[in-house]
C-alpha cells in the first residue's frame, strides 16, 4: 500500500522511482561525509546476507541457525483471465533456512527495522525494504546521519520490519511470526524487551490476544535508533509474501476463533466507496444481488480483531476486493471458497498463498477491465479502482456456493 494520499496515487510509480534514486545518490555522499557524526554515522557497507555479516564480525555477531529451508510447490489457481503470470511466478519457490542474529551492541533504526552492526555494517537480509535493487537504495540513506542513538540494557528482540507499522497484513505475517523464528533458533531466549510498533488499535488487540500486552516494548518510530547490549534479530518469516505453511499454522494455533455460531456463512469484504482506494466501482449494482443470495457485507477495518477472526473462521464463502482485510483468510475454515477481485495493474499472490496453507481451501480470481501489465512488469496501479461487471462475479456463484 502506498502512503500517498488518494489524490496523489496516480503519481506513485514516479514517486517510488524518485525515492530509490534519492536514496542511492544521497547515500553516495552520506557514507563518505557522515563519519564526522561518530556513532551516528551511516552504515558504510553491507553483508550480502546475514551469514556474511556474521563471518565479517565474528567477535560481535553470531548466527543461530534454525529450521532448514524448503522447496515450495503450488498449483495454479483458476481465474479470469486464466493462467495469470503473477500466480505462475509464485508456484515454485525455495524458502531459505531460518536463523536469528545475536549482535553485541547492535543498532536498530526506524520503523522499518534496519540492522547495523558495531562494525558499521548494514545487514541487508534482515533489513529488507520494498522495491529496491540493493542495499544502496535502502531509505536509511535518505538521512545525513542516524537519529540520536538511545542505549538500552539487556537484550532487545527486533520484530519490526518494512510495512509492519501501518499495514495489517505485514504486522500479522511479517512482524509477529518473528517470535516463532526466535523461539525455533534460540529456544531459551527470554528477551528483556521487544522492538515493534504498537500504536494502532489492531496492533494492541493482536498483542493482547497473544498475551504480549504486558511485555516491555521499545516502540518503533521513523526517526529512532536504539542500541542494545544484545540485539536479537530473527530472520524474516514471510519471504516474497509466500505465507509458508508453518507460518499460517502458527498464527491459526495462537489466534483461534472463539465464537462463530452467530456469524454469516457467506461474506462480501468491501473496500468502501472512496475513489483511488481500490474500491469496486460496480459494488452498488452488485451488492443487492449478493445480499439476495444470503451474503453479509463486512468492512473489517471497522471491526475488532476478535470479530474479524471469528467472521472469517465462520465463513464458508468469501468474496473480497484485494486489500489488507483479506489477511484474515489466515483464520478461514478448512474447505473455504474464496473469490478475489483485482485491478489489472495491481495483482498480488499474497492472499492466494495464504489459502494454499489452509486444508481444502479453494481460490479463484477475477481481473477487472483495463490494460494488463506485461509479464514481469511493475504492478504500478497500487490504488487503482476496480471495474468488473456484476455478472462476471455472479457467474462464479455456482462454484462459490458449491
Image (cartoon, grey):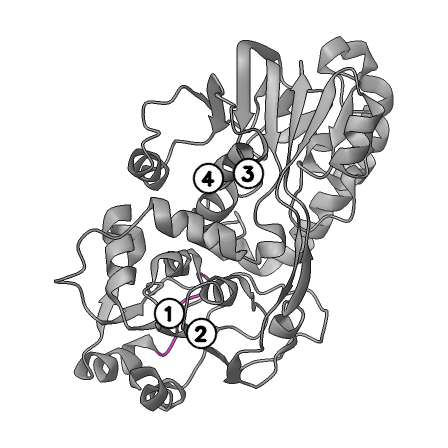
Q: What is the x, y in percent for residue 234?
A: 59, 34
Which residue is located at x 78 percent, y 25 percent?
121
Could you tell me how far apart the alpha carbons at marks 2 and 3 are, in whole angstroms?
Answer: 33 Å
Which is closer to the viewer, label 2 or label 3?
Answer: 3
For marks 2 and 1, the one nearer the N-term is 1
Q: Residues within 10 Å of mark 2 (few under 14, many from 20)?
A: many
Task: From the viewer's side, name the closer residue of 136 and 310.
Answer: 310
Which residue is located at x 64 percent, y 48 percent?
130
Residue annotated with mark 1: 320
Which is closer to the viewer, label 1 or label 3?
Answer: 3
- Does residue 292 lie above or below 67 as drawn? below
Could you tell me how far apart the alpha carbons at marks 4 and 2 are, in whole angstroms?
Answer: 27 Å
Secondary structure mostly taken by the magenta-highlighted segment of the chain: loop
Q: Which residue in the rendered view is the most extreme toward the left?
A: 262
Residue annotated with mark 4: 176
Circles 2 and 1: CB atoms closer than 8 Å: yes
- Quadrant of res 185: top right
Could you tell me how far apart the alpha carbons at marks 2 and 1 are, in whole angstroms?
Answer: 6 Å
Residue bounds of the magenta highlight: 277-282
Question: Does 284 sit left or right of 180 as displayed?
Answer: left
Q: What is the x, y in percent for residue 309?
A: 29, 54
Residue annotated with mark 3: 181
Which is closer to the viewer, label 3 or label 4?
Answer: 3
Which is closer to the viewer, label 4 or label 2?
Answer: 4
Could you tell me how far apart the alpha carbons at marks 1 and 3 are, in whole angstroms?
Answer: 31 Å
Q: What is the x, y in percent for residue 44?
A: 83, 25
Amino acid at each position: 500500500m502506498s502512503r500517498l494520499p488518494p489524490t496523489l496515487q496516480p503519481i506513485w510509480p514516479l514517486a517510488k522511482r524518485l525515492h530509490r534514486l534519492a536514496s542511492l545518490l544521497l547515500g553516495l555522499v552520506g557514507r563518505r561525509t557522515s563519519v564526522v557524526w561518530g556513532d551516528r554515522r551511516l552504515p558504510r557497507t553491507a553483508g550480502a546476507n546475514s551469514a556474511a555479516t556474521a563471518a565479517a564480525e565474528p567477535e560481535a555477531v553470531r548466527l543461530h541457525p534454525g529450521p532448514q529451508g524448503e522447496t515450495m510447490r503450488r498449483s495454479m489457481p483458476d481465474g479470469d483471465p486464466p493462467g495469470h503470470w503473477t500466480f505462475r511466478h509464485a508456484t515454485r519457490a525455495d524458502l531459505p533456512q531460518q536463523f536469528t542474529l545475536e549482535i553485541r551492541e547492535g543498532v536498530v533504526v526506524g520503523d522499518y527495522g534496519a540492522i547495523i552492526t558495531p562494525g558499521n555494517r548494514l545487514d541487508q537480509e534482515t533489513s529488507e525494504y520494498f522495491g529496491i535493487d540493493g542495499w544502496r537504495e535502502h531509505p536509511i540513506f535518505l538521512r545525513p546521519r542516524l537519529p540520536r542513538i538511545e542505549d538500552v540494557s539487556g537484550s532487545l528482540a527486533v520484530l519490526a520490519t518494512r510495512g509492519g507499522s501501518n499495514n495489517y497484513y505485514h504486522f500479522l505475517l511479517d512482524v509477529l511470526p518473528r517470535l516463532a523464528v526466535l523461539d525455533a533458533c534460540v529456544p531459551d531466549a527470554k528477551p528483556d524487551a521487544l522492538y515493534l510498533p504498537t500504536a494502532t488499535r489492531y496492533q494492541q488487540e493482536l498483542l493482547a490476544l497473544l498475551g504480549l500486552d504486558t511485555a516491555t516494548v521499545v516502540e518503533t518510530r521513523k526517526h529512532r535508533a536504539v542500541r542494545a547490549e544484545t540485539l536479537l534479530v530473527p530472520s524474516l518469516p514471510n519471504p516474497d509474501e509466500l505465507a509458508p505453511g508453518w507460518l499460517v499454522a502458527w498464527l491459526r494455533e495462537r489466534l483461534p476463533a472463539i465464537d462463530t455460531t452467530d456469524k454469516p456463512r457467506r461474506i462480501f469484504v468491501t473496500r468502501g466507496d472512496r475513489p483511488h482506494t481500490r474500491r469496486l466501482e460496480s459494488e452498488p449494482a452488485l451488492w443487492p444481488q449478493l445480499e439476495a443470495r444470503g451474503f453479509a457485507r463486512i468492512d473489517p477495518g471497522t471491526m475488532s480483531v476478535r470479530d474479524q477472526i471469528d467472521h472469517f473462521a465462520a465463513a464458508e464463502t468469501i468474496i473480497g476486493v484485494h486489500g489488507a482485510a483479506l489477511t484474515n483468510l489466515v483464520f478461514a475454515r478448512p474447505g473455504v471458497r474464496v473469490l478475489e477481485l483485482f485491478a489489472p495493474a495491481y495483482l498480488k499472490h499474497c492472499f492466494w498463498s495464504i489459502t494454499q496453507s489452509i486444508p481444502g481451501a479453494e481460490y479463484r480470481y477475477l481481473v477487472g477491465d483495463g490494460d494488463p501489465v506485461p509479464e514481469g512488469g511493475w504492478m504500478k496501479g497500487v490504488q487503482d479502482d476496480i471495474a468488473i461487471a456484476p455478472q462476471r462475479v455472479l457467474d462464479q456463484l455456482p462454484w462459490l456456493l458449491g
